[in-house]
Amino acid sequence: MQPQFAIGIDLGTTNSALAFAPLAAVADPHQLPGASLFPIPQATNPGEVRDEPLLPSFLYLPGAVDFPPGSLALPWEAGQNYVVGRLAQKRGVENPSRLVSSAKSWLCHAGVDRGAAILPVNAPEGVAKVSPVEASRRFLEHLRRAWTQAYPEAPFEEQQVLLTVPASFDAVARELTGRAAEQAGYRDVILIEEPQAAFYAWIERHPDWRQRVGVGDLILVIDIGGGTTDFTLIAVTERAGELELERVAVGEHILLGGDNIDLALARFIEQQLAVKGVKLDTLQLHALWQNCRVGKEKLLEEGSDLQDTPVTILGKGTGLVGGTIKAKLRRADIERILLEGFFPAVSSQDMPQRARRAGLQELGLPYAADAAVTRHLARFLRQHASAAQSAAVRRGPSGLACPTHVLFNGGVLRAGLIRERLLAALNGWLEEEGLPAVLPLAGEDLMHAVARGAAYYGLARQGRGVRIRGGVARTYYVGIESAMPAVPGVPSPLKALTVAPFGMEEGSAARIPDREFGLVVGQPAEFRFFSSPLRKDDAAGSMIEDPGEEIEELAPMEVELPADGGDPGAVVPVTIESVVTETGQLQLWCVARDGRRWKLEFNVRERLAP
Amino acid sequence: MGVSLGRILLAFRGFFGILFHGKLSDGLAARLGLARQAAKAAAPQPPAPDHVDGAIQILSILQRDARLIDFLMEDISAYDDEQVGAAVRTLHDLSRDTLKRYVDLVPVIDGVEGTFTSLGGTAVAKNPALVKFLGNVPAGLPQGGLLRHKGWAAKKVDLPVPKHGANVVAPAEIEIE
């Protein structure tokens, strides 16, 4: 059956959204139908299900006495025994040890076994934990069933589903996301990078985009969400007289976002209160954190000239007025904290500090050590972007990649002040390079653009709109031990064989014929697997003698030739072939001389050395 | 998607049915799927919610989301205006947000208070539940007068079906250290 809708899903670190667009015949390819947001029914209180524009990406694992029996029922599941969404988030504040949050960040954290039941990290004994994949599955399943409940005549499984991932997700994290979707009952899900989706959303809102950008332009997408920051560069090129878009660089996964800013404000107020002798407990600090977010948004709202706003924590227990703690959030303080902590004016040569800072961390996840978004941006433009060979990347005399336009995305960037800070930093660097200032592209609806853009991409894939060419966002390697005499105590040097070059496009395959490996039938063979977001010029089959720090190790890959593939114990010579599927996932295959093929699977159980 | 008119009407009728008659009408119960369950008659049915349950529900929602009961039950005479003001600003925001989430309140007469408002012959004028006449009210039906208060009407009520027999407005809270 032909899908009726393209469904775009933004599976966020803190919030998820779903948008959809009809796939019906479109007469004019420059006038595509718009994407609509799907209000997501979810438990908002015990015994209460409401539609909300976002599904908070929180999972709560209730105990026996958490909720009255039957009060978690959903319209499609009377016997629901866990909570996702608003109620999970609310109850999780009161009992954090049963709350799974930031599941997505765990999905790309190579330091843990991502298939194992490890979340919530601090759950007391007796709580049945879940894996990061399982938590993601539950969010995705909730969306699938909510959709089918609302549109039974267009069941979810029959629609074209596009799921967004951070551009910085490596092949393992993408594979795990795909696995979670599959387990949630999704079929043929297509992965799309979030900053690209944000750019598609801009195109969707500006059908005349061809008049707004031209050949040679370089668009920087800055996406700051609740928990993560993501950078991408998209170049405007030309082929056969038509404008083309090419994603030329993606940044690292930076665990730093709006929540950090709000927490920093809350900590600042907490200190002010401490001076007055007022101490806050955990729940009060959390209330203050939320109030600071609301207060910050109020002060930084477009056109607001408020200089301060009260933040109030109501009294504990039944003594409400008597226990009320009041403080003021001042615009000047916000500006100072943003300027000093998160968006300092730095030189384009400044690189983020590596040392970890206390106060911004939580056990487990590798939070960004340096809170300065501007320094992360400087590094991105200095290192990642300039490594791209693409002639389309505009560079300044110092080698810095110099964007002509900037597109903002993510809830944090609704605040004009923060956008100004980023623009000021960028324009300062451009001025040093002797180049004019960037033009901000007006984004709208920064909270939902990614889901909308993903739905638009569903239309674009049907040949009804422009597509951004990109391919894989990193170069991938398998490790090969050097054939050198072993020296006790020194690991033999490792070489890296390029198996998938940067930019390898969806639906293409690369064969590495010169290098054969001997696989023993009936025995598992393991390949060490590496990637680099920085090395963009290694061609498939090229050997890197001294990989250095630019290459990082991912989860190992395993393959076992079944015994019916030959005599047990026999050695089968194979070459490696990499395939990027139409749905955007990277696969490695072992190919025997007679053409038989075996797929390499990620082994995420292995714990990697940090 | 939005809430369909049918669902709005259902919520409206359910709310007032419970509020004024203490139970849901049979037809409405059938639409909510309650009658169908009764037909099975296999499992004992929980008793239908009554007017007390509806009242407790509203109180517990205002307490849960806005802490209104804490405020009303507290003796605030000892606190100065600044302290009360700080709490009330927050409380007011929370209470209003909560109320708006569940009840869509609109004026009965959407006019400017203090100005002459004509009611000539409208059905509104004949319904004492909608309009109350004050002052020198003539023997017959008044044609209009100064609008003193716009009135409030619940245009839409969107409350979950309350549980029967729960007389708890807010649970006690115990923190494990």
Image (cartoon, coloured by chain):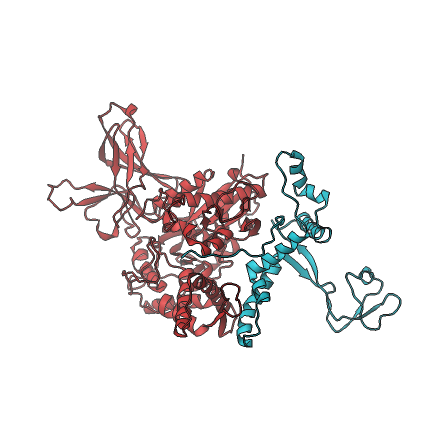
- Can residue A38 be seen at all in this image of the molecule? no
Q: Quadrant of residue A260?
A: bottom left
Judging from the image, what is the letter of the chain drawn in cyan? B
Q: Residue furthest right?
A: B139
Q: Quadrant of residue A485?
A: top left
In the figure, the shade used to draw chain A is red
Percent across and percent down for residue A480 are 21, 41
Percent across and percent down for residue B35 are 68, 39
Percent across and percent down for residue A431 are 35, 69
Percent across and percent down for residue A369 are 31, 60
Q: Nearer the viewer, residue A563 or A605?
A: A605
Left or right: residue A550 compared with residue A457: left
Q: Quadrant of the C terminus of chain B?
A: bottom left
Left or right: residue A85 compared with residue B11: left
- Can residue A17 be seen at all in this image of the molecule? yes
Left or right: residue B93 compared with residue B39: left
Q: Nearer the viewer, residue A607 or A240?
A: A607
